[in-house]
Amino acid sequence: EPEVTQTPSHQVTQMGQEVILRCVPISNHLYFYWYRQILGQKVEFLVSFYNNEISEKSEIFDDQFSVERPDGSNFTLKIRSTKLEDSAMYFCASSDSGTGWEKLFFGSGTQLSVL
Amino acid sequence: AQSVTQLGSHVSVSEGALVLLRCNYSSSVPPYLFWYVQYPNQGLQLLLKYTTGATLVKGINGFEAEFKKSETSFHLTKPSAHMSDAAEYFCAVSDPGGYQKVTFGTGTKLQVIP
């Protein structure tokens, strides 16, 4: 089965540093997402991206966050100045349809630790 | 706003016993409902989904779930647990109109005892 791949699997950074989390969605998918899971809490929606622009974002996704599809294969999440509370598992997902009931393919996640 | 509540953050069953993971939802419109599974060090994998039609839905690995509107529930069951079922299970809901966002529950870790 096709896979969404995320790199790195673990990222440790100092508070205030910029981090970029990378994702390679499934090649024929057009809709891309970031979710995150703080330890012991729910998986939370951050942002969706289609046609080279953000289509929806949550209240978590403030000015410190940005997403980009720099080429035909990568989809990145940038956190400009990390805070302790940004420590979480970040999941990238992609789908071939924008409707929520279609199958989302998730990556295995990047564990971000902000010290 | 939609939400799901999963009762029990940890559930233990013996191998061969019935698996029952509980999920209740809250939604102002008829929801789409999902169960996802996460094995250690892996991504979230869709087990099954309910959109419309038959309220009993069957998924992969012998799991099934029944949508009960009167009880606002979507519990996940499997008649006989296998060691390989040990994982974390997430119930999720999507508003058919708000199509791009899936709201997840807090998850239930299933332990299978030999």
Image: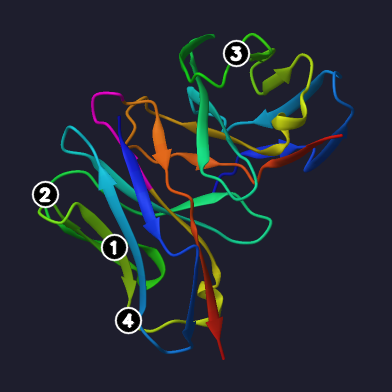
Does B95 lie within the magenta span? yes
Q: Which residue position is annotated with label 3?
A: A62
Q: CA distance from mark 1 to mark 4?
A: 13 Å
For the residue carrying disc 3, how many other residues have a C-alpha within 10 Å: few (<14), some (14-19), or many (20+)?
few
Q: Quadrant of the C terminus of chain A?
A: top right
Look at label 2 and name its amino acid: Gly
Amino acid type shown at disc 4: Pro
Chain letter for the residue marked with disc 2 in the picture: B
State the CA–CA distance, disc 1 to disc 2.
17 Å
Viewer-side residue, B92 vs A15: A15
SS at circle 1: strand
Mark 1 closeness class: few <14, some 14–19, many ≥20 residues within 10 Å: some
Is A44 on the left or on the right of B70, as rendered?
right
The residue beneath circle 1 is B75
Residue topped by disc 4: B79
Gap between marks 4 and 2, in whole Å?
A: 23 Å
- Crowding around mark 2 (Cα neighbors within 10 Å: few <14, some 14 to 19, many 20+) is few
The one nearer the camera, B82 or B60, is: B82
Distance between mark 1 and mark 3 Cα atoms = 35 Å
Which stretch did the figure color magenta?
B92-98
